[in-house]
Image (tube, grey):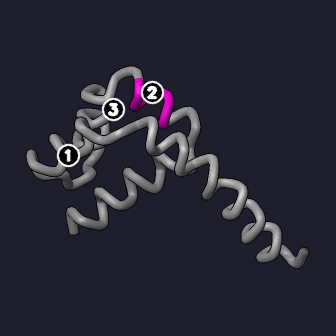
């Protein structure tokens, strides 16, 4: 279950600019909010997220977000 939680946090970091900005500014606070809201992260997973390359997330978002938008448009009959 926790692997899915980590993947969902990473996915949100890539697709949600406001979340990514908050995470970049206060990663420990964001992780605490996530665990307080019931996201099952172990201490090892929390530490790994804290050490994550947020600049890499920005670069990945630049590549993936336009593709996701394109897929979303196709799904709506376009």
Q: Quadrant of residue 71?
A: bottom right
In this rendering, position of residue 24 left or right of residue 18? left
Decide whether the magenta segment is chiefly helix, strand or loop. helix
* Position of residue 46 measured from the top left corner of the image (x, y, whole percent): 18, 43
Q: Quadrant of residue 49?
A: top left
Q: Is residue 33 above or below residue 71?
A: above
Label 1: state its secondary structure. helix
Residue that badge 3 annotates:
30
- Mark 3 and mark 1: span between their CA atoms? 14 Å
Q: Is residue 18 above or below residue 56?
A: above
Residue that badge 2 annotates:
22
Label 2: state its secondary structure. helix
* Position of residue 65 measured from the top left corner of the image (x, y, whole percent): 65, 54
Q: Are marks 2 and 3 in contact (CB under 8 Å)?
A: yes
Residue that badge 1 annotates:
48
Which region is colored magenta? 20-24
């Amino acid at each position: 279950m926790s692997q899915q939680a980590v993947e969902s946090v990473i996915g949100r970091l890539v697709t949600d600019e406001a979340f990514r900005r908050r995470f970049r500014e206060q990663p420990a606070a964001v992780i605490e909010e996530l665990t307080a809201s019931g996201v099952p992260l172990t201490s090892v997973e929390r530490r790994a997220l804290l050490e994550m390359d947020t600049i890499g997330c920005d670069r990945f978002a630049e590549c993936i977000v336009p593709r996701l938008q394109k897929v979303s448009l196709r799904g709506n009959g376009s």
